Amino acid sequence: MQTSYDTLHALNILIIGNGGREYSIALALRKDNKVKNIFFSPENPAATLLLHAKHFTYQNHNELLTHIHTHNITFVVIGPEAPLMDGVSDFLESHGILVFAPSYANAKLEGSKAYMKSFISKLKIPTARYKEITMQNIEEGKAFIQTLPLPIVLKASGLCGGKGVLIIDSREEAQQQLLLMLQGKLFGEAGKNVVIEEFLDGYELSIFALSNGNDYVVLPACQDHKRLLDNDKGPNTGGMGAYTNLPQTLYNKELEEKIKQKILTPTFNALAKEGTPYKGVIFAGIMVVANEPYLLEYNVRFGDPECEVLMPLLKTSALKLMYVFAKGETLKSLTFHDECVVCVVMTSSDYARDSKSNDYPAIINFHGIDPKDTTSSVGHLVFANTTRKDSVLYANSGRSVVAVGKGASLQEARDNAYTLVAKVNFKGKHYRKDIAYQALL
């Protein structure tokens, strides 16, 4: 039976997912003394070692439900998009388990970029010109490419972990890459349906809104850094860093109101009208052009690494926030710490590259820092793709460790983040050195 937040005690919580986003959610949840145990599925090895989190794996919905009953878990938070598209949220709620996550019907906003573009176009939400292309109408796609100014944007319609986007500076190359995507040679099945999109020249924002199915609140805006290398060079990645509490020149009340009125409110109203009111967090990827917001895409979960900078900002209990919204109720107030947060992602040397290194797993060394310390005013570490052997942590190929810096100013938060980066070492450690550059020019 679901109870009110005020009467909760000794709560066992399951977090589905095991990356940096989920580790950050765990750090935020465990600040609430109503939480007894946090479980991960699958395991986040650093959370097991440093946070004393528990873990289990499951192969199907029924096995998941058995674990939930065995461990007396009464609240579930779903981090990544794949379980949502697998219907986990709907299944658990049908068995009386409270879940902070949207339904399968609403998860399609991320699960299919073609569906999302069609949905928002009907609502006249501002977005880039586009065409949905499959192998059956590839000639139409080639013709559309010829009408677009450079660069050309190609998006795999299906789930690609935030990596299924190509930005191409040549129409000839765009046509070649389109064919490879449609043949399944670049992004597998996810790329066999492609959205060709007009490139919008502006700056990006990550906007997160929490909805209870009736109304919604907007969290502080973030900026993510997708490209692998400094100065926004190199391939797109899952994210190399993020920051929040943006300067007024990038985000202000006027712009927030435009995003609400033109993008978020029409979306939530339409979903409610269709009989699928949205509950959980929605992530709007926004491009701002001449102070006007355009919707690039929707994701149906917290971004990673944006989650790493949003969770420390919460003054309101993260458990209370998620639990109340999952129940479809409204919070009387939502408060944030008056500080800035910057995170820098440390990856393996082969991250987002064609060839893989044999150097991983690589032992992680800490110099003058306790990886368990989450109380320092300077900041803390978050752990993503790692393994453990006994009490030693190893970095895997991919995004491994995130340094989260806090400060009274963006510059101070950024400096603290890079101070933490310098105290973490593993073979081939790679990171960007210009996170938050747009705000600190």
Image: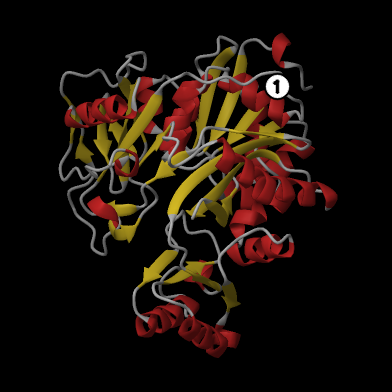
Query: Does 315 sit left or right of 241 as displayed?
Result: right
Q: In the depicted view, which residue is nearer to us: 111 or 407?
A: 407
Quarter of the image for the N terminus: give it.
top right
Residue 389 falls left or right of residue 46:
left
Q: Is residue 210 above or below residue 4?
A: below
Q: Residue at x 62, y 21 (%)?
A: 334
In the image: residue 44, left or right of residue 438: right
**Eyeballing the image, is 283 above or below 334?**
below
Q: Position of residue 160 (x, y in %)?
A: 48, 59
Image quadrant in which you'd find residue 216: top right
What is the count of numbered marks?
Answer: 1
Quadrant housing the C terminus: top left
Q: Is residue 179 visible?
A: yes
In this view of the protein, which residue sits in the foreground, 115 or 296?
296
The residue closer to the viewer here, 110 or 173, is: 173
Q: Which residue is mark 1?
A: 331
| Image location of residue 407, percent across then percent down | 33, 21
User: Dot 1, crowdedness within 10 Å: few (<14), some or many (≥20)?
Assistant: some
**How are the residues colored?**
secondary structure
Q: Identify the element where label 1 is drawn.
A: loop
- Residue 23 lies, in percent from the top left, at 44, 30
Which residue is rendered at x = 76% and y = 26% of the image?
329
Q: Residue at x 17, y 37 (%)?
A: 426
The quarter holding residue 382 reads top left
Residue 313 position, x and y percent, is 47, 24
Residue 350, relative to residue 416: is it above or below? below
Q: Is residue 43 among what the camera can see?
A: no
Q: Residue at x 68, y 27 (%)?
A: 69
- The residue type indicated by label 1 comes to Leu
